[in-house]
Image (cartoon, rainbow, N blue to C red):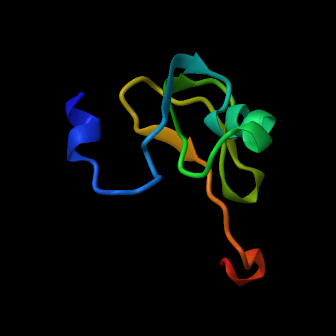
Amino acid sequence: GRFHAELRTKALGRVLLHGERMESTQEFLNDRLLSCPAGVVCIADVQSKGKGRGGNVWESPAGCLLFSFTARVSRAALLP
């Protein structure tokens, strides 16, 4: 629809996965990482076991922006 028509990226967001409630968008993608192309975005309305940097875990209220995406990098050691 309109989202894809307005999208200006070659990969990021070309494939969107949405769930009303997920434990973790990050874990969902990690479990499927090898079968997902780069740029897949996974969105949830609510996460019950969201994960962040440093191992932080939370339950999110509805209305927050909750997403993870896949990426392929050639030199991961250079990432912060």
**With respect to residue 5, does 53 lie above or below?**
below
**Split into 4 quadrants, where in the image is the C terminus?**
bottom right
Give residue 74's position: percent from left, percent from top: 71, 75
Residue farthest to the bottom, as pictured: 78
Q: Quadrant of residue 62?
A: top left
Judge by depth and name the residue closer to the eye, 14 or 41. Answer: 14
| 70 left or right of 31 in image | left
Q: Residue at x 28, y 56 (%)?
A: 8
Q: Residue at x 24, y 27 (%)?
A: 1
Residue farthest to the top, as pictured: 20
**With respect to residue 74, does 5 lie above or below?**
above
Judge by depth and name the residue closer to the eye, 51 or 4. Answer: 4
| 22 left or right of 41 in image | right
Give residue 44's position: percent from left, percent from top: 50, 27
**With respect to residue 52, does 27 lie above or below?**
above
Q: Residue at x 62, y 57 (%)?
A: 71
So how many labels did they put on this image?
0
**With respect to residue 37, does 45 lie above or below?**
above
Q: Residue at x 79, y 34 (%)?
A: 31
Give residue 73's position: percent from left, percent from top: 67, 69
